[in-house]
Image: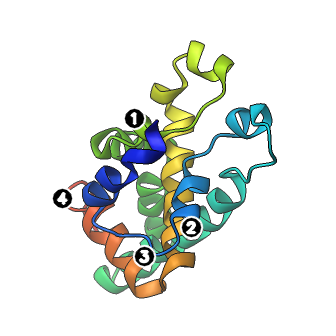
């Protein structure tokens, strides 16, 4: 089962979870949770948190790196780094789709390759790393694993 190989994903993202439950929740799609025999948490709440953290870290880095950019230019650049296409591409490079826990219907629709599922699970992973550690650890993940050479601040 995919859960047995989460340590492979931890190596790829460069973060070892203390609470493996947070990692599992970040990778659990609601279709998988709804089909489970017992109630399971799924990644939407972590996605909400991760999206906010991602926006903050990107805004902070842009602000620090571009002293003369206007608010409009900072906003435009931030939107490039937090959009679903960009995040889905990073999730593909990290191989996150191989670890997603999906329901039967989502599997039939090739949900592990779905752009939205990939972007959402990356945001959920950000939220999970934050809850498992602190802002410094999640900042390091965002700046060096997500944006490393992929985005110019």
Q: Could you say where residue 61 lies in the image, as x and y percent from the top left?
A: 37, 78
* Contact check, label 4 and label 2, Cβ < 8 Å: no
Disc 2 crowd, CA 10 A, few/some/many (<14, 14-19, 20+): many
Cα–Cα span, label 1 and label 2: 19 Å
- The label on residue 98 is 1
In which quadrant will I find the C terminus?
bottom left
Q: Looking at the image, which is closer to me, 115 or 19?
A: 19
Q: Is residue 67 visible?
A: no
Whether 42 is drawn above or below 33: the answer is below
Counting residues from the N terminus, which is met first, the one under dot 3 or under dot 1?
1
Q: Nearer the viewer, residue 89 or 44?
A: 44
Crowding at dot 4, Cα within 10 Å, few <14 / some 14-19 / many 20+, comes out as: few
Checking the image for residue 85, the label placed there is none
Query: Considering only order in the chain, which callout, 4 or 3, is on the residue closer to the N terminus?
Result: 3
Cα distance in 3D space between marks 3 and 4: 17 Å
Residue marked by disc 2: 127
Disc 2 to disc 3, C-alpha distance: 8 Å
Residue found at x 32% / y 77%: 140
N-terminal of the pair, mark 2 or mark 3, is 2
Where 112 sits versus 101, above or below?
Answer: above
Residue indicated by mark 3: 138
- Look at discs 3 and 4 and give the one toward the viewer: 3
Q: Nearer the viewer, residue 8 or 134?
A: 8
């Amino acid at each position: 089962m995919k859960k047995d190989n989460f340590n492979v994903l931890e190596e790829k993202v460069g973060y070892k979870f203390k609470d493996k439950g947070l990692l599992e929740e970040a990778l659990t799609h609601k279709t998988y949770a709804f089909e489970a025999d017992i109630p399971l948490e799924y990644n939407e709440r972590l996605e909400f948190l991760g999206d906010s953290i991602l926006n903050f870290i990107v805004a902070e880095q842009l602000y620090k790196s571009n002293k003369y950019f206007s608010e409009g230019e900072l906003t435009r650049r931030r939107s490039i780094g937090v959009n679903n296409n960009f995040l889905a591409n990073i999730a593909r490079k990290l191989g996150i789709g191989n670890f997603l826990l999906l329901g039967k219907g989502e599997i039939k629709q090739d949900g592990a390759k779905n752009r939205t599922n990939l972007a959402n699970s990356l945001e959920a992973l950000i939220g999970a790393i934050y809850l498992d550690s602190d802002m410094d650890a999640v900042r390091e993940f965002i700046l060096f694993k997500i944006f490393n050479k992929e985005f110019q601040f």
